[in-house]
Amino acid sequence: MTDPVIQNPTWYADIRYFFSEIDIKHMRSFGLELGTYEGVKTNASNIYAQVSAKHMPPGDPWSDNKIKSFLNWMINNYPMGTAPTTNLLAATNTAPATRIRKEVRELSDAEVTNLIKAFKGILGKDTSDPNSYFVQAGYHWFPGPNLYCQHHVNNYNPWHRAYLHSFENALRSVPGCENVTLPYWDFGNTSEFPDLFTKEPFASYTLPEAVSANYQKGYATSRFAVSHILEGFKNQVQPQTLFALKQKTWELFNGFNAQGYYGIIGGHDDGHVTTGPTMADQGVAAFDPIFWFFHANWDRLWWKWQQEMQATTLETFISTVTDASNLAFFQVPALEVLPPFEQKTTEVIDLAANLDTDYQHPASETLTTEKALRFFGSLPATNAISIDVDNTSVRVKGINRLKIPGSFIVRLQKNGEDIAWKGFFQPAEPETCTNCSANALINMDFRLPISKVEGGKLGIVIEPMDKEMTGDRISLKAVGDPTIHARLLVTDE
């Protein structure tokens, strides 16, 4: 039988495939969301009533076995589960992409030579040329006149994906480099620092003209010591990256403010502030050549997660979104634009099909298939829950980041000694940024074993990256008197 009853169906492995794109789009117009876990779970009783009466879908009702499988999902308390190991989307996949991005340390000598030629080519272009390094790097913030800040929002991943595509096209504009691709830096491998980054033209960049009052012609990008960079990526970036890749939902993967920026966005911010003074300043970060390899890996990690979750098309991607406001964002065309680039948010979700780009994962790396349990601060009393003492959440809530000039670090202390830290990446004048102003109050989440936080007094210190204006510390009163919350996390899985 090709349509057997599924005794223990889950959302990701089974239920989300019960609804076609036509079903989803049609019912969405009537206010019934069939494309998301929360939407189907909330309306499960109504859906069951309609399909069991053979009213849905019109003209093509579900089989009795499919109806029974859906009922089993309801009886089993709507398990989320994980994506199947077999790619159910393979039949809809397009031809393989032609742009294949590799890990920077796995490039052949010929590929390195071509990459150097491409970089030198765009570095040598006039600063008015749209394919010049100066213009491409300037899209990230300075020199303007349009200031694009796509951080700590839904568009963070899509915008930077389009940005990398634009930069790669610029590299391809150099004669003889028409097939060059932008490599990525697998910073999960902290055994060594890529030697290529210490050589020209990747070691630094000198501004050919002023981009702001603080960054004049002749400013040269700078980084911290290699040992400092590798330590920061090992202790800060890696744990959040691994956490993100194991998550089942867009919100937990991305790490929005409700999660205290713990996930991809949190790891991204920590990576910026641990790399160096230039990378820590949003205004000029993209002028450091390492920026491009750094961000190519974040894009790879997003694509990797999409592949594992079988969320490589718009509708399958939406099936991983749980928050109503985030869902609305991906459904409203007016919010899709990614200025100054041609693509829209919905168009870059399918990297291979729409941007003709794919990644060759490192030879030593395998795709993550095990997904972590979802932990919450609280759950309905009707649920059977378990507690994980290895994941205590210490959350600093209500930091008014508009009062802090530039990127900063929040240090969690016990009895006056640092036990953890997290960085936050932002422009020097965040109050001038629309996105920053719309998300002025932020939370910072620290995940620690209970043994690390118990038996002492907890406190925080906020340290600006640029200490010339404010000194070594930011007054807590000046940023709205943030509060500290500590709680054990629970799960019902």
Image (cartoon, rainbow, N blue to C red):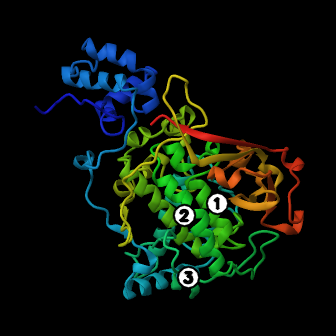
- Tell me, yes or no, whether the two marked residues, 1 and 2, touch with CB atoms within 8 Å: no
Q: Residue at x 54, y 47 (%)?
A: 337
| Residue 33 visible to the viewer | no
Mark 1, residue position: 269
State the CA–CA distance, disc 2 to disc 3: 20 Å
Image quarter in which the C terminus is found: top left
Left or right side of 233 for 244: left
Measured from the top left, where is residue 306 in percent x and y? 40, 51
Q: Residue at x 84, y 48 (%)?
A: 479
Mark 2, residue position: 238
Nearer the observer, 484 or 27: 484
Q: Residue at x 33, y 17 (%)?
A: 48
Q: Earlier in the sequence, mark 2 or mark 3?
A: 3
Vertical placement of 398 versus 114: above or below?
above
Q: Amino acid at mark 1?
A: Asp
Q: Element under label 1?
A: helix
| Residue found at the far front of this picture | 455
Q: Element under label 2?
A: helix
Q: Element under label 3?
A: helix
Q: Amino acid at mark 3?
A: Phe
Q: Earlier in the sequence, mark 1 or mark 2?
A: 2
Nearer the observer, 353 or 372: 372
Q: Quadrant of residue 140?
A: bottom right
Mark 3, residue position: 197
Vertical placement of 263 versus 285: above or below?
above
Left or right side of 274 for 239: left
**Few, some or many C-alpha atoms within 10 Å of disc 1 (few <14, some 14-19, many ≥20)?**
many
Vertical placement of 319 versus 133: above or below?
above
| Residue 6 visible to the viewer | yes
